[in-house]
Image: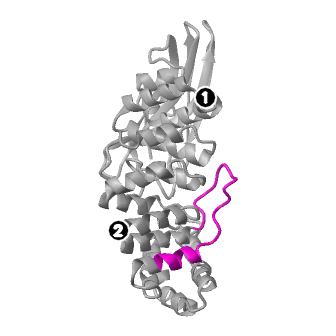
Amino acid sequence: MTSNKGFSLKDQLFNLEKVRYFAGLFYAADKNFDAKGFEDEVMETMLDLELKARMNLISEVLENYLPRRFPLAAGRILAALPPPLDPTKTDDDFGWFVLGALGEYVVRNGLNDLPVALPLLREITKRSSMEFALRHFLNAAQDETMTALKDWVQDDHYHVRRLVSEGTRPTLPWGLKTGLKVTDPVPFLDLLHADSTRFVTRSVANHLNDISKKDPALVVQTLERWHRIGLQHKKELDWMTRHALRTLVKTGDKGALALLGYHDQPDIRVSGFNISSSVRIANTGEFSFDITADSDENLLIDYVMHFVKANGSTAPKVFKLKKLVLKKGQTVTVQKTHRFLKGATTFTHYVGAHRIVLQINGQNFGEADFDMF
């Protein structure tokens, strides 16, 4: 992935320095490891490849430098691992991404040797997250892998505990689908939601957000139960609740809104909603409106842009605007400037007739059309 500013994620994560570091780990553990040969073989073709292919290449080349028997190779990998990421922290990133190649190696060589492969993944994930590799094992040996996760959910290292949630997510971005039902990992989440580390609770919230796209009621019921039993600090559980319900809030789910303190029929009046009638790509569009509350109300205000796609159809995208607490009889004017970026790497604007919808507590409180040129 390269941006218009020249930044390359693949070159940052997989380059000569990282490959040399990777090879050096094995050489430090075993002076017979041909670090220079490994480095040369990887670098011969790696820079021509995309990010995921670079990781796969490293794992494939590693097979030429480790014993063919997987238990022996696993022992070499264990000996080469760097120290675990700091277990005293409460949040962290993925660690050294290049170590993800070890997960690919374990998938390629260890699916038929679970007693060796699964403990090895547990150790590797303390240095670099193994959720993508874990999903291969869930597909190949679901019962055995889930049994291992029952132990890992109470592991001393928070990266191992996080793996239990992250690796079993229903729709992990860039991850394989698994044969798990959305209810299967919920007993794990029941334990992990009370974790003391944000790295774990963020994964739990993201996991619930995944479930919400398949079973909204299960997510709301689970969060309600967690609030009742009070195992997690209220401030952290409130944050998890907001994060887990972000998709349901955008769709106006009544249960999600109620759990967050909003109801789907607020006693308000909206007037003067309008936007610039025409907007040039790369410029801004301004809109405003007045809200009058006829009762005390908590309001969650979003707006939905219906963007024109390349084929001429439109697709909605929800943007957060603000939260308001209004007293009965109070009127507030809200103004917003939306920038229609040109040349963004993740989104392209097209000319044509667009629409903006004002969404308050998940409900439509006004629409306006505008042309983009």
Tell me where residue 168 appears, x and y as whole percent.
Answer: 41, 50
Q: Is residue 149 among the parts visible in the rendering?
A: yes
Along the horizontal axis of the image, is 86 left or right of 292?
Answer: right
Q: Is residue 279 among the parts visible in the rendering?
A: no
Whether the residues at callouts 1 and 2 have beta carbons within 8 Å, the answer is no
Query: Which corner quadrant of the image does residue 138 belong to?
Result: bottom left
Between 205 and 264, the one lying in front of the other is 205
Tell me where residue 59 appears, x and y as whole percent.
Answer: 45, 77
Mark 1 is on which residue type?
A: Gln
Along the horizontal axis of the image, is 351 left or right of 28?
Answer: left
Q: Secondary structure at mark 2?
A: loop
Between 40 and 124, the one lying in front of the other is 124
The residue labelled by disc 1 is 335
The residue labelled by disc 2 is 111
Residue bounds of the magenta highlight: 73-96
Please tell me how crowded label 1 is: few (under 14), some (14-19), or many (20+) other residues with Cα within 10 Å: few
Q: CA distance from mark 1 to mark 2?
A: 57 Å
Q: For the residues carrying marks 1 and 2, which lies nearer the camera in this image?
A: 2
Based on the picture, tell me whether residue 84 belongs to the magenta stretch. yes
Query: Which corner quadrant of the image does residue 369 belong to?
Result: top left
Give the vertical position of 277 relative to 258 (above or below). below
Tell me where residue 201 appears, x and y as whole percent.
Answer: 56, 42
Residue at 41% from the left image edge and 65% from the top image edge: 115
Residue at 40% from the left image edge and 58% from the top image edge: 175
Q: Could you say which disc has been placed on residue 81 in the image?
A: none
